Amino acid sequence: MISEKLMRQADGKVVNIIFFSGEDLKGVKCTNFYRKEEDDEENMLEIGDLIINQSEIKELIILAK
């Protein structure tokens, strides 16, 4: 699983995301980072109208601002 720090750094930047399921998103803009507020929640990234949980992301590559 990727780190919270890397997710925070992706906020507002163009990224590639590779999922554990084998799917990927390339050249998408991360519009927001949501930090978990409770222990039973997860950190999340917002990509347009998608919300992606930290546990779904195998690899996160930051491409540009």
Image (cartoon, rainbow, N blue to C red):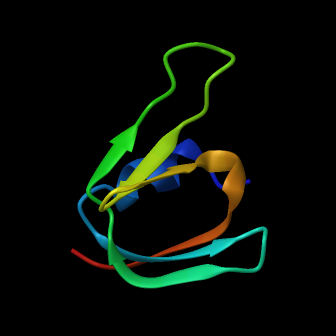
15 lies above or below 30: below
| Residue displayed at 57% across by 13% down | 38
Q: Position of residue 7 (x, y in %)?
A: 47, 52
Q: Residue furthest front?
A: 49
40 lies above or below 4: above
Q: Is residue 64 left or right of residue 43?
A: left
58 lies above or below 41: below
| Residue displayed at 49% across by 43% down | 44
Q: Position of residue 56 (x, y in %)?
A: 69, 56
| Quadrant of the rendered image containing residue 19 | bottom right
Q: Position of residue 3 (x, y in %)?
A: 61, 49
| Quadrant of the rendered image containing residue 21 | bottom right
Front one among 2 and 56: 56
| Residue displayed at 37% across by 44% down | 33
| Residue displayed at 32% across by 63% down | 30
Q: Quadrant of the C terminus?
A: bottom left
37 lies above or below 17: above
Q: Is residue 35 left or right of residue 11?
A: right
